[in-house]
Image: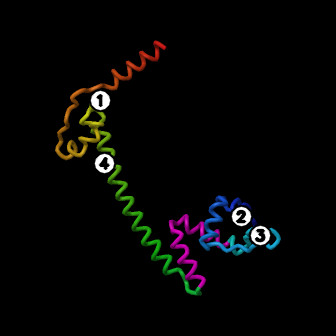
Amino acid sequence: MKTVIEIANRFNVSADTIRHYTKLGLLSPEKDTANGYRRYGIEQERRLRFLLSAKRLGFSLKDIRAILDMAASGDTPCPLVRKLIDQRLEVIREEMRDAQKLMSRMESASSDWRDLPDCAPSGESICHLIETWDTANSAGNRAPCSETRSMQSTNSHSDETKREI
């Protein structure tokens, strides 16, 4: 029988993780009558190993609870597991498509902005790169800065100041 700390160390998770799973009823330790400490036996170690494997596969704690409940009732959870992982796969695929679109927008913006001047903030503008990106990207025209500050002049000024110090 292991304490919270011992089982946490054995499975390379935090003691808080073990306590959280216990609080949710995903783990059911025995209470040591001598000191009231929770003790985790072999069955709880197996259950934790299952829990951590399911988490690594992307199952939520709610999903894991449903799987454990189904197994505890004597029914095979395998059809539920297949259904849940297929649903999760579709969500991940959608997230990946969204991430690909975002990456494409970011690459386009980065490329478009590479040769644009640095503009000083004004009462009407914070950063013209972001403020004009949608317009510039769709219309192909870019509003020039009313006041520009090139990185070279800003950097050379900073370099001169550093050298003076």
Residue 48 point in image, percent of width and height: 64, 69
Position of 13 compared to 126: left or right?
A: right
Q: Which residue is mark 2?
A: 4
Could you say which quadrant of the image residue 119 lies in? top left
Q: Are circles 4 and 1 on residues that touch, CB within 8 Å?
A: no
Instruction: Please name the amino acid that badge 2 sits on.
Output: Val
What segment carries the magenta color?
Answer: 46-72
Q: Residue at x 49, y 81 (%)?
A: 79
Task: Give the mark nearest the N terminus, 4 or 1.
Answer: 4
Task: Select label 3 or label 4 by which is in front.
Answer: 3
C-alpha gap between disc 4 and disc 2 = 47 Å
Instruction: Please name the amino acid that badge 4 sits on.
Output: Arg
How would you rate the neighbour count of disc 4 (Cα within 10 Å): few for under 14, some for 14-19, many for 20 or more?
A: some
Task: Select label 3 or label 1 by which is in front.
Answer: 3
Q: Which of 153/122 is in front?
A: 122
Q: Per the image, is 47 magenta?
A: yes
Determine whether the residue tagged by mark 1 lies in a helix, strand or loop. loop
Q: Which residue is mark 3?
A: 36
Q: Which residue is mark 1?
A: 120
Task: Give the mark nearest the N terminus, 1 or 2.
Answer: 2
Task: Give the mark nearest the N terminus, 3 or 4.
Answer: 3
Could you say which quadrant of the image residue 149 lies in? top left
Position of 59 compared to 3: left or right?
A: left
Q: Which mark is residue 159?
A: none
Q: Are circles 2 and 3 on residues that touch, CB within 8 Å?
A: no
Q: Residue furthest front?
A: 123
Q: Which residue is mark 4?
A: 105
C-alpha gap between disc 3 and disc 4 = 57 Å
Residue 59 point in image, percent of width and height: 51, 69
